[in-house]
């Protein structure tokens, strides 16, 4: 009984670390009261943001449980929007299920060929 003294307070530290989700786990939330969406491999709980979203709640509800990276980027959200979304982040996708969109961009750069400039030359005769 003397061992009762030992503190079991490790949960406080654990709560600070970000959670990892699978796409299936996020999708499951489409049936609950919460609205979770994936954007750039991050998971956001936008339940409390629905009413405040300048683009309306409907577009977010349509994306409930899904990866909304494309529609999010298509709209061309401002940097303010990108800062704002950080406060709704609840975690990230597990490594195996992440899309590699940033990698694709890096590859484009490394393949960048100076000669391509010539090919895209345009002549306008006045
Ligand atoms: C956490 C995620 C999101 C945040 C914080 C957010 C925030 C914002 C903000 C601040 C604006 C005002 C314009 C700007 O500053 O860019 C906006 C506009 C808009 N958003 Fe979002 N948004 C999010 C996700 C989405 C998603 C997933 C979609 C589409 C599926 C979407 C569709 C739109 C649309 C259609 C507008 C209106 C654009 C316009 O009227 O020109 N948003 N959003």
Image: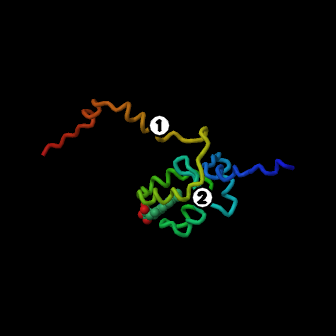
**Do residues under tags 2 and 1 come within 8 Å of each other at their CB atoms?**
no
Q: Nearer the viewer, residue 126 or 43?
A: 43
Name the residue located 52 percent from the left edge and 48 percent from the top edge.
40
Residue reaching furthest right?
Answer: 1
Q: Position of residue 2 (x, y in %)?
A: 84, 49
Circle on res. 57 = none
Q: Position of residue 19 (x, y in %)?
A: 63, 48
Which residue is tagged 2? 45
Residue drawn 57% across the image and 51% down it: 38
Does 112 appear above or below 77? above
Query: x, y (%) of residue 14?
Result: 66, 49
Determine the secondary structure under disc 1.
Answer: helix
Q: Residue at x 42, y 39 (%)?
A: 105
Examine the rendered structure and indicate whether residue 48 appears above or below residue 124: below
Judged left or right of residue 118, residue 33 is right
Q: Indicate which disc, 2 or 1, sits on the residue closer to the N terminus.
A: 2
Q: Is residue 12 left or right of residue 81?
A: right
Query: Residue 103 has which mark?
Result: 1
Which residue of the protein is positioned furthest toward the bottom in this rendering? 51
In the displayed structure, does residue 85 sit left or right of residue 123? right
């Amino acid at each position: 009984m003397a061992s009762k003294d030992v503190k079991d307070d490790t949960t406080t530290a654990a709560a600070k670390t970000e959670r990892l989700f699978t796409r299936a786990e996020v999708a499951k939330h489409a049936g609950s009261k919460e609205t979770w969406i994936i954007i750039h491999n991050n998971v956001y709980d936008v339940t409390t943001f629905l009413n405040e979203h300048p683009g309306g709640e409907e577009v977010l509800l349509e994306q409930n449980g899904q990866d909304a990276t494309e529609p999010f980027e298509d709209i061309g959200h401002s940097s303010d929007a990108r800062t704002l979304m950080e406060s709704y982040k609840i975690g990230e996708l597990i490594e195996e299920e992440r899309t590699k969109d940033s990698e694709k961009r890096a590859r484009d750069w490394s393949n960048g060929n100076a000669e391509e400039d010539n090919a895209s030359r345009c002549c306008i005769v006045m």
